[in-house]
Image: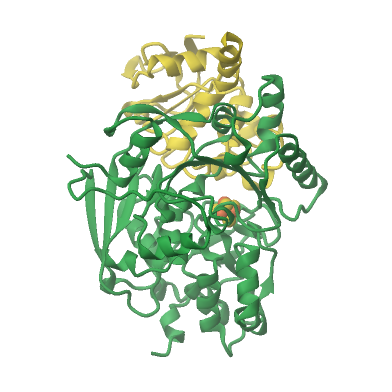
Chain colours: A green, B yellow
């Protein structure tokens, strides 16, 4: 019987021929990522107390993005602790003011097809778009990895999600994953892996695939993964690093196979206070918005900004609504600056935020007041996620967010797409 | 610490990390975060929850973020155990690593607010002293029980490094 891509990665990482779902295995970690909120500040004391060092500084990357730039002294101190820590342990893969912890490691070529990676942030599953298995761990688990280079994992079952056909105009990867969330719910993939496949997925650019794997955790998944095809291999070529891509066997076993038709898709929005509370954007046109946000590891990539610019060209953000844009990385910002995407967004009235997590987790500039409503291209809309527990967050594609910012109410982006 | 006795705080399904440990307090250390535990559900809860109390949830407890601050806030508030139908995977691992007992019990829904429970951690039995009922939670593998017993992964690593 064949193996899935995930089982192959886990077998290799645990030094075994094969693994089966349900088995507990110890794995050697190829790469470990931590961010500023859950990273060095939380493990530094323990590491000193244990009188231990890091297992391999070259296999650890630290990305400061949650409290960047710091908005008060406590946050500034967290940044200082992080900087001192990487220096002390000789970690060169350290990035601050460069972008978000799930995007920068992909840009840098750290997330290589076929590797087993762990990340100290729940959206670490994002890296699965590169054909790697990336599993999220909490701080203490990361401490174990940082000291030993190992961790234990249960071999998960895999749900295969097959997307077939052409996406209709006005629909994007965000609408695909919201459709999956509606079907599976926020616990529908708990302890399981989501493997996205099918011609619709293969036709998506990397930026869009990242949305599918990024939001796998919203269904409770251990991670999300996509087999590395031409698009990914070409992207990796420029990185000049070695890697060994692996693929699912044709006779691999899946706990469930979900077939979805792209042609039937329409722009979707997740309503408060859960990402699986999904409705058609067109059905929410009576809902006014105070804030529109394009940003985050999910919705602040170049493709998102360019899509939004396509809608905002020659338009103005509605009076009484504010549009905030935070590029997911410096690189995204540079590219959007170079080709006029940024100019279009600013001309429409957008406010530019630094390339970091921004208001996505209610940590930084752009938080919501009591009773305020935001439409956002991010991944989570739990109560209080972006500020007051009396505020509301709706989630949609960058196109839906852009269209809504022009009308001041939730808007189906097809109203703005001239075909 | 193999038997736990306490009074129940009952929650529903899908209690997520952002309501247990709101993002705006993430910059705080865990003991201070504990003063805001469950604030996203009810701002008065941090006042009401007392050391020794037991938290009981429904399905998918602890979904969302990987923030360890969520189980840490519960632990630092003095809660002695969390029982739920099932847990979100990262929360489950984090709780164990911190030495906070977590029990998956399909009958969690029978437990009500204010009930008095007695939990046997070794074999996973939960006695509802208020209702005179007994439920069976899934038994934690021995190496995980061991981890909880020594107080989590840090003390465990400490032992391991000493033994080297
Ligand atoms: S952008 Fe949002 S979801 Fe992504 S890492 Fe930052 S806080 Fe988390």
Single out the residue that lies furthest toward the right. Answer: A73
From what the image shows, is residue B128 above or below residue A404? above
Q: Position of residue A173 (x, y in %)?
A: 40, 66
Q: Nearer the viewer, residue B104 or A65?
A: A65
Q: Is residue B61 visible?
A: no
Q: Is residue A20 visible?
A: yes
Q: Residue at x 75, y 56 (%)?
A: A69
Q: Residue at x 43, y 78 (%)?
A: A412
From what the image shows, is residue A109 above or below residue A202? above
Is residue B51 rendered to the left or right of residue B59? right
Quadrant of the rendered image containing residue B159 = top right
Question: Quarter holding the C terminus of chain A?
Answer: bottom left
Q: Nearer the viewer, residue A321 or B145?
A: B145
From what the image shows, is residue B145 above or below residue A139? above
Is residue A292 rendered to the left or right of residue A413? right
Q: Position of residue A205 (x, y in %)?
A: 42, 68
Q: Nearer the viewer, residue A324 or A36?
A: A36
Question: Quarter holding the N terminus of chain A?
Answer: top left
Q: Residue at x 38, y 19 (%)?
A: B140
Q: Position of residue A225 (x, y in %)?
A: 37, 51
Q: Residue at x 39, y 26 (%)?
A: B111
Q: Position of residue A253 (x, y in %)?
A: 20, 43
Quadrant of the rendered image containing residue B138 = top left
Is residue A69 rendered to the left or right of residue A138? right
């Amino acid at each position: 019987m064949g193996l899935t891509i995930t089982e192959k990665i886990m077998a290799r990482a645990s030094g075994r021929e094969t693994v089966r779902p349900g088995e507990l295995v110890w794995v050697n970690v190829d790469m470990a990522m931590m961010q500023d909120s859950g990273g060095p500040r939380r493990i530094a004391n323990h590491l000193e107390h244990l009188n231990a060092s890091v297992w391999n500084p070259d296999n650890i990357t630290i990305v400061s993005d949650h409290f960047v730039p710091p908005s008060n002294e406590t946050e500034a101190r967290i940044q200082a602790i992080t900087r001192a820590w990487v220096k002390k342990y000789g970690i060169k893969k350290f990035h601050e003011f460069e972008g978000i912890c799930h995007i920068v490691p992909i840009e840098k070529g750290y997330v290589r097809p076929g590797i087993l990676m762990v990340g100290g942030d729940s959206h670490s599953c994002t890296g699965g778009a590169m054909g790697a298995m990336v599993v999220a761990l909490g701080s203490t688990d990361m401490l174990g990895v940082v000291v030993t280079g190992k961790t234990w994992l249960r071999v998960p079952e895999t749900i295969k999600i097959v997307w077939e056909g052409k996406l209709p105009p006005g629909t994007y990867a965000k609408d695909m994953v919201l459709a999956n969330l509606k079907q599976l719910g926020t616990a529908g993939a708990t302890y399981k892996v989501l493997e996205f496949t099918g011609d619709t997925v293969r036709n998506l650019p990397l930026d869009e695939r990242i949305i599918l794997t990024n939001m796998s955790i919203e269904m409770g998944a251990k991670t999300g993964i996509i087999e590395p095809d031409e698009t990914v291999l070409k992207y990796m070529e420029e990185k000049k690093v070695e890697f060994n891509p692996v693929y699912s066997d044709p006779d691999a076993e899946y706990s469930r196979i979900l077939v979805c038709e792209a042609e039937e898709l329409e722009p979707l929005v997740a309503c408060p206070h859960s990402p699986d509370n999904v409705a058609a954007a067109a059905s929410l046109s009576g809902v006014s918005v105070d804030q529109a946000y394009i940003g985050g590891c999910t919705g602040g990539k170049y493709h998102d900004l360019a899509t939004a610019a396509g809608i905002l060209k020659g338009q103005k953000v509605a009076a009484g609504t504010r549009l905030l844009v935070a590029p997911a990385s410096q690189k995204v910002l540079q590219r959007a600056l170079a080709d006029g995407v940024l100019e279009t967004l600013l001309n429409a009235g957008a406010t530019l935020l630094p390339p970091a997590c921004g208001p996505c987790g209610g940590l930084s500039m752009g938080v919501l007041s009591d009773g305020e409503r935001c439409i956002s291209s991010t991944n989570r809309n739990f109560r209080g996620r972006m500020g007051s527990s009396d505020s509301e967050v709706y989630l949609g594609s960058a196109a839906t967010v852009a269209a809504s910012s022009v009308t001041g109410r939730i808007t189906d982006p097809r109203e703005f797409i001239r075909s | 610490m193999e038997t736990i006795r306490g009074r129940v705080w009952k929650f529903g399904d899908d209690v997520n990390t952002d309501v247990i440990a709101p993002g705006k307090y993430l910059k705080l250390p865990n003991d201070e975060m504990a003063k805001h535990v469950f604030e996203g559900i009810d701002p008065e809860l941090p006042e009401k929850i007392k050391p020794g109390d037991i938290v009981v949830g429904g399905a998918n407890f602890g979904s969302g973020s990987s923030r360890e601050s969520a189980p840490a806030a519960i632990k630092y508030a003095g809660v002695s155990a969390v029982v739920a139908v099932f847990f979100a995977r990262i929360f489950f691992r984090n709780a164990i690593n911190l030495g906070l007992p977590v029990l998956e019990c399909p009958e969690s829904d029978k437990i009500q607010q204010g009930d008095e429970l007695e939990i046997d951690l070794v074999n996973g039995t939960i006695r509802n002293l208020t209702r005179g009922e007994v439920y069976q939670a899934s038994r934690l593998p021995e190496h995980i029980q061991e981890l909880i017993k020594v107080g989590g992964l840090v003390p465990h690593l400490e032992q391991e490094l000493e033994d080297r």
